[in-house]
Image (tube, rainbow, N blue to C red):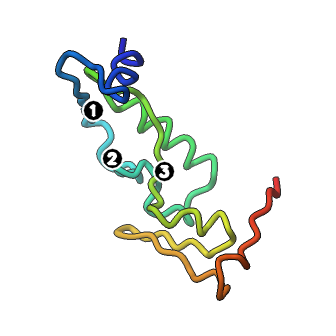
Amino acid sequence: MVKQDWADWWAGTIKHPFFGIEALDDALAGTPFTYNEITPVESDELSADQILDGIEQFGMGIHWFGGAYPKFWPNYGPGVMAAFLESELHIRPDTVWFDPLGVEELEQIQPRFDP
């Protein structure tokens, strides 16, 4: 039902009130993750396993109602594409920023897939 409601909402055809509520469990207090970001505040001090365990623990502490649904959103901001293009990513508790790419013209950026 939630999937169809979202499809109807995007199509502009939904015929009933539609909203979601995400409620946090009190057990989440003290985890290194924040609600809107679901990313570790001090990621350089946590191993990949600790980060993944924290994300899983955090996800199990959210209750989803109405049109809400479980999701994972690592919020690194609108400039995250720069990090994918080899810009240095700086994560701090209150902000995220990226170093300039070192090009003069956009045409100089040559993205490539490198697994």
C-beta proximity under 8 Å, tags 3 and 2: no
Q: Quadrant of residue 82?
A: bottom right
Q: Secondary structure at mark 2?
A: loop
Q: Secondary structure at mark 3?
A: loop
Q: Earlier in the sequence, mark 2 or mark 1?
A: 1
The circle on residue 22 is 1
Q: Give me the residue at 25% from left, 28% from top.
A: 20
The answer to which of 31 and 40 lies nearer the viewer is 40
Q: Disc 1 marks which amino acid?
A: Glu
* Residue occupied by mark 2: 35
C-beta proximity under 8 Å, tags 2 and 1: yes
Q: Give me the residue at 36% from left, 11% from top.
A: 1
Bin the neighbour count of mark 3 within 10 Å (Cα to Cα): few under 14, some 14-19, many 20 and up.
few
Bin the neighbour count of mark 1 within 10 Å (Cα to Cα): few under 14, some 14-19, many 20 and up.
some
Q: Position of residue 5 (x, y in %)?
A: 33, 18
Mark whose residue sits in front, 3 or 2: 3
Q: Earlier in the sequence, mark 1 or mark 3?
A: 1
Q: Disc 3 marks which amino acid?
A: Pro
Residue 64 as seen in the image, left or right of residue 85:
left
Separation (CA) of disc 1 from disc 3: 17 Å
Q: Is residue 94 above or below residue 30?
A: below
Q: Position of residue 21 (x, y in %)?
A: 23, 30
Bin the neighbour count of mark 2 within 10 Å (Cα to Cα): few under 14, some 14-19, many 20 and up.
few
Q: Position of residue 27 (x, y in %)?
A: 30, 36
Residue 106 as seen in the image, left or right of residue 9:
right
Q: Position of residue 107 (x, y in %)?
A: 70, 76
Q: Quadrant of residue 45?
A: bottom right
Q: Is residue 105 above or below residue 109?
A: below
* Residue occupied by mark 3: 74
Q: Is residue 18 above or below residue 114?
A: above
Q: Give me the residue at 57% from left, 43% from top.
A: 52
